[in-house]
Amino acid sequence: TPLPDLVIVGAGLFGLTIAERCAEELGLRVLILERRHHLGGNAYSERDPETNVEVHKYGAHLFHTSNERVWEYANRFTSFTDYRHKVFGKYQGQVYSLPLNLALINQFFGKSHTPDEARALIAEQASEFDTASASNLEEKAISLIGRPLYEAFIKGYTGKQWQTDPTELSADIITRLPVRYTFQNGWFSDTYEGLPTEGYTAWLSKMADHPNIEVRLETDFFAVADDYKGKVPIVYTGPVDEYFGNSEGRLSWRTVDLEESVVDTDDFQGTGVVNYNDGDVPYTRIIEFKHFHPEREKTHLPGKSVIVHEYSRFAEEGDEPYYPVNTADDRAKLLKYRDLAAAEPMVLFGGRLGTYKYLDMHMAIGSALSMYDNKLKPHFAEGAELK
Ligand code: FDA
């Protein structure tokens, strides 16, 4: 069989965006290699066969962006519902509206505050530490929001996310802890927000639905690399350390264990996401997926609901890498991998695994569009060197 014009490793949003642009605008023949049994990367979802509720298989995915170009691009493949994401947090038997806002402050301190009174209260409580000289995450957080809110809403949750006491975590894990002195409790503050009307898999499949695009599932690039390396341009969106055989050491990641269950109730928690802020509750969040699509209510099996308990921990070999840990040691290794990547002929590295960066979906699409504009199109349309 003849070689394709371009090989893409990974059928996530980054790889699919590159594939779609190169096939549609440049007429290239694109081969996508994907080692999982499905396309879509971590944004993939499935309908639960019993309840018909759409479940995001790699953790809850909420789409939001302020980037006009990304919004217009995404809307070529799907429409979006008017879902607006909200998050609630449990602490010591109460439920609060997150993120930190005036409703939470009033409820937590048991009294009504004007925005100015709340600002003065938090400023006074935050004066315990100086932000610039904070020596660990706990001191930094207290210097931003004060000890009472820190102990209720950050300490237990962050400790569980990192499986490490916040006094042992680096202060640079957090730069800001915004407090809203209003009752506004939308989780995101982007211009556009919503969920794909027909679901993520319909959206992502449509991106690959082009006669010039072939998606080869259950195919690990490393098993067939000799067929393509050095022979055709490659966009690689897998883990950068793995590409180089972990020669500089493994980059560290956090993973999340997702425990899915069907419960015998129409409504388990009344909303999509509830955080568990108490340190002694082992999970960090419970997701109840049907609440992401209230407009589908009639299509869901009555009397049942799908929930997922999330448990965060450090990833070991074989675990899904979810969030870069990004220690000083990781950053030093990453610099070496970046040099190796820049020197690798005919291969471009992209996406969250290829760059060791947490990317939201709109960022993955946006950075793929930039790679297309700045590297692939100049190469294929104008003969520029690929680097
Ligand atoms: P992605 O990981 O999706 O795709 C890479 C693909 O490459 C995978 O399918 C993998 O199997 C494949 N691959 C790797 N190595 C390979 C090899 N050797 N051979 C073949 N295939 C290989 N974003 C957002 O906007 N809103 C949200 O709410 C969330 N929520 C969220 C929750 C959790 C728990 C996580 C971890 C992430 C999110 N995200 C998110 C981020 C979102 O998942 C992310 O933006 C996209 O997955 C990025 O797409 P990529 O294509 O870069 O990677």
Image: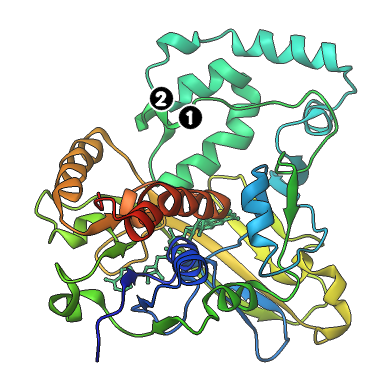
Question: Can you give x and y, in whole percent of width and height, for residue 234 in the image?
Answer: 27, 65
Q: Amino acid at mark 2?
A: Ala
Q: Nearer the viewer, residue 75 or 94?
A: 75
Instruction: Calculate the distance from the C-alpha at mark 1 to the C-alpha at mark 2.
Output: 6 Å
Image position of 107 (left or right of 193): right
Which residue sits at x=63%, y=49%?
69
Please determine whether, in this image, residue 63 is positioned above or below residue 161.
Answer: below
Which residue sits at x=76%, y=49%?
86
How many labels sit on residues? 2
Q: Secondary structure at mark 2?
A: helix
Which residue sits at x=58%, y=18%?
144
Please determine whether, in this image, residue 77 is positioned above or below residue 377.
Answer: below
Question: Can you give x and y, in whole percent of width and height, for residue 145 in the image?
Answer: 62, 21
Please determine whether, in this image, residue 51 is positioned above or below residue 280.
Answer: below
Question: Can you give x and y, in whole percent of width and height, for residue 376 in the image?
Answer: 37, 56
Q: Quadrant of the N terminus?
A: bottom left
Verify CB contact (< 8 Å) between mark 1 and mark 2.
yes
Question: Can you give x and y, in whole percent of width and height, for residue 270 in the image?
Answer: 82, 62
Residue hosting label 2? 171
Q: To which quarter of the image does residue 315 belong?
A: bottom left
Q: Nearer the viewer, residue 259 or 44?
A: 44
Image position of 118 (left or right of 90): right
Q: Amino acid at mark 1?
A: Ile
Please determine whether, in this image, residue 212 is positioned above or below residue 257.
Answer: below
Residue with the most extreme front position = 382
Q: Colour mode?
A: rainbow
Res 62 visible: no
Residue hosting label 1? 174
